[in-house]
Image (cartoon, coloured by chain):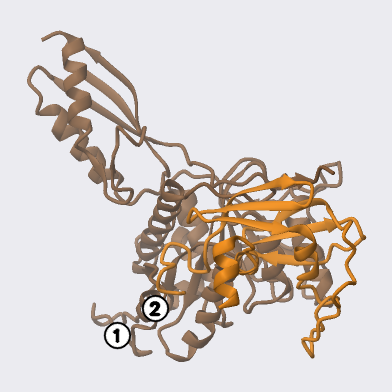
Chain colours: A orange, B brown
Amino acid sequence: MSEETNEEPNGPSPSDIKQIDEATLGITWTDGHESIYHVKFLREKCPCANCIDEWTGEKKIKPGMIQDTIRPLKLKTVGLYAVQFDWNDGHSTGLYPYSLLRSLCQCQDCKAKSAA
Amino acid sequence: MSDQELQVKVMAALKTVMDPDLHKNIVDLGFVKNLNIDNGKVRFDVELTTPACPVKEQLKNECSQKVGAIDGVSEVDVNMTAAVRASEHSQPILTGVKNIIAVASGKGGVGKSTVSTNLAIALSQTGAKVGLMDGDIYGPSIPKMMGIPISPPKGAGNNKFHPHEKHGLKVVSAAFLTEEGQPLMLRGPMLGGIIQQFLQNVEWGELDYLVIDLPPGTGDVQLTLTQRAPLSGGVIVTTPQQISLIDAEKGVKMFQQVKVPVLGVVENMSYFVCDGCDKKHYIFASGAGKQLADQFKVPVLGEIPLLPDVVTAGDSGLPITLSQPDSLASQAYRHLAGQVAAQISINQTKASKKVGAGFELAWKS
């Protein structure tokens, strides 16, 4: 990982972030890759200390806990390294670093790779 | 030859003048401005991206030589100017500030404040408008080094306040928020609050460079700054010993994790020159700065000598770059300022399109 990322030591950054449809977020990266995400999946992967226990690493979000109606109200960048979502269930404490978002990519290629 | 024909030749000649840092010719970079030719007399401006450009004289000479060599040119007048370009940021705070430089080290006691102060002065000596923010809330030392008496900042209305001004710099420090000598006793979250105020509630005005002197470590102040302020780059200060590398590495990795470009490494207390001979004595072994720079593939921006005068100057409130502009240390600081400014300009020209800080997207349902 570190060898190929000469330009950006901690991986690529988004060059565009957009809403694709009612429940899908799209990110285009500086290396040209295009990621798609189902927003419910992103909410389930929230990395904040309420959703993943800081000490034990236990996931507090159990399958089925997040409703299908979950949507962001708005999202914004934090500094130069992360995205913060305001969700319609009132949650907003998760900062998603770009490296995490990239590893969560739901495009066919990346899904196949992470399943392998 | 008509002046029009001459103009074509002059532009062609200037197209062969390369900026050694940006690796492009100065015409394509848009540096050449206000070309005026009158009866063989050629006048033009070369507008650099920073007044601290380390190769200013070299470029000027090359321009006059190449243009002067054209048949029909009787006189060349090259006027070197600078317009500092803003690093990309759209955050509503610090809108008048073009570039923000964070000076960090993992370790304490390596001379961050001395480096920050003299770097800021050296930048301003090139003609740039510079601010200096003392990010060390618990141990602020910038006011002492700058010779600014402790007094509360002046209010500017609308909940804002004016920075102190001294030696041509605008200065903000937590030292001004307490009685002299009184400790500020705060828990972590308050630190972030004070930094937020320094960013949001200070009337910085128009600045080319804001230098931020960070406290040691990777804590609240660093996090708030990287989350709230659109930093153009970080400078890592280390000393020559291997032991200071352990923490300096963490400083570099902190910037990398939050995607702030690391401009390079400064090795402070690099060598000692005694008054008896001109030999550089590397009393703390040498090379930690170079080693760190190589490891992370960033440049060594400068090596600052260890001189008693640097300390005396800092204690007296008149930093070495002002009190003894010809000293070896001052020369090293001027070189450092040039390198820092050059790295920022290089990063700006090669920056790919990115979603900036302050990006927001409202979801449509």
Q: What residue sits right under mark 1 in the picture?
A: B281
- Give residue B6's quadrant in the image: top left
Viewport quadrant of the N terminus of chain B: top left
Residue A99: image location, x then y, percent: 60, 68
Query: How far across and down, in percent of the image, does residue A94 sit?
Result: 79, 67
Q: Residue at x 34, y 85 (%)?
A: B286
Left or right position of B212 against B46: right
Q: Nearer the viewer, residue B166 or B281?
A: B281
Comparing B328 with A115, the one in front is A115
User: Does residue B151 appear in the picture of this structure?
Assistant: no
Q: Identify which residue is drawn at 68% across, 46% down.
A: A18
The kind of residue on which mark 1 rests is His
In percent of the image, x 70 and y 76: which residue is there? Answer: B219
- Percent position (x, y) of residue B340? 43, 58
- Above or below, comparing residue B273 to residue B319 in the picture: below
Distance from the alpha carbon under mark 2 to that under mark 1: 25 Å
The tag on residue B295 is: 2
Q: Secondary structure at mark 2?
A: helix
Q: Say whether residue B105 is left or right of residue B267.
A: right
